[in-house]
Image (cartoon, rainbow, N blue to C red):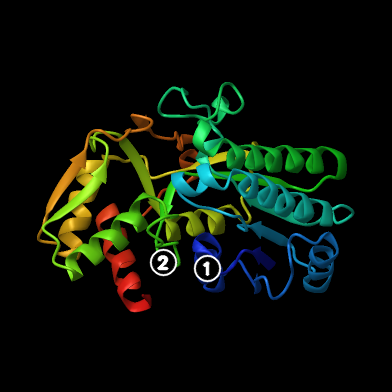
Amino acid sequence: MKVLIFGSNGLVGSSVNRVLNNSNKVSEVFGATRKDANLFSLEETKSLISQVSPDLIVNSAAKVGGIHANNTQRVEFIIENLKINMNIFEACIGNSDIKIINLGSSCIYPLNADNPISEDSFMTGQLEPTNSPYALAKIAGIEIGRSLNLQYGNEVVNLMPTNLYGPNDNFSEDESHVIPGLVRRMHNAKLHKEKEFSIWGTGNPLREFLYVDDLADAINFLIDKPVDTDLLNVGSGIEISIKDLAYKIKEIIDYKGELIFDKSMPDGNPRKLIDSSKLNALGWKPSISLENGLEMTYKWFLENS
């Protein structure tokens, strides 16, 4: 099987590239970057797919970021992600033999969905306002994929991962997600011997995290696995409070200062856990613990910062 990965330099794409290059299910992997094709151009996207002639496309290309980036770059998040999804799917019209594994996000689910959040919660309520443009672009991608399947016959599987972390993440202080943001800021606090480290909110909200190589392993698992649904959650099934997460990172980094939780700042959603039982029932489960994942992430950060 020949696989084309879009977004192969990013957090997800680079991990999928590593895992599939060691998979006995795959004969050839082409990791596409911006140098190979501008995904804002339909013609360049079509041209690359025609050149590679893949059996499977893994779409991990996206503009991503944390709450601050999502809330302050709303136009860019919806337009850029819509363009990427539209061009990749449209470029596959007429190539019904190409299977597509499309990477979505658990942010597609309603803000007040019951936990653990099942795939049945899709499009049943209001989205989280801060990242609704990104979520809507991902929802549009799912709907385009479903339409491609119904009208042209392509097999499309949409994966909704929980909060991901690991090598090649965005460790920017301003635009990153919670784990890389805490790693970057706490590492800097350690270097500057700061006595206090401030964290937004009470630290009480519960979140679920998945090391990115576990997601790549799930993709490898699904390459030749027939599924009777086009929407699958991918999570660890393990919750942790932001406070406990911060103390785990503090221990790994060996930061000696005090963690201060700024209760004047908002907590956000008190709990978010996705239900991955459908994928688990197919035979897949994650293998990397949060502790090991955090240690590997910090090691990669030190070697690449």
In front here: 58 or 169? 169
Residue 72 in picture, x, y percent from top left? 52, 45
Q: Is residue 222 left or right of residue 214?
A: right
Q: Is residue 212 above or below residue 284?
A: below
Q: Is residue 29 above or below residue 245?
A: below
At mark 1, the secondary structure is: helix
Residue 99 in picture, x, y percent from top left? 73, 54
Residue 86 in picture, x, y percent from top left? 77, 49
Residue placed under numbered mark 2 in the picture: 167
**Residue ID at (86%, 52%):** 93
Quarter of the image where one finds residue 181: bottom left
Q: Which disc, if any, is residue 125?
A: none
Category of crowding for the residue at label 1, using alpha-carbon neighbours closer than 10 angstroms: few (below 14), some (14–19), many (at least 20): many
Q: Quadrant of the C terminus?
A: bottom left
Q: Does residue 134 show up?
A: yes
**Residue ID at (71%, 54%):** 84
> Quick one: label 1 or label 2, which is nearer the N terminus?
1
In front here: 110 or 194? 194
Q: Does residue 230 show up?
A: no
**Residue ID at (32%, 33%):** 267
Q: Are marks 1 and 2 in contact (CB under 8 Å)?
A: yes
Q: Residue furthest bottom?
A: 303
Residue 117 in picture, x, y percent from top left? 46, 29
Residue placed under numbered mark 1 in the picture: 14
Mark 1 to mark 2 CA distance (whole Å): 8 Å
Q: Amino acid at mark 1?
A: Ser
Q: Amino acid at mark 2?
A: Pro
In front here: 212 or 206? 206
Q: Is residue 141 above or below residue 87?
A: above
Category of crowding for the residue at label 2, using alpha-carbon neighbours closer than 10 angstroms: few (below 14), some (14–19), many (at least 20): many
**Residue ID at (47%, 46%):** 283
At mark 2, the secondary structure is: loop
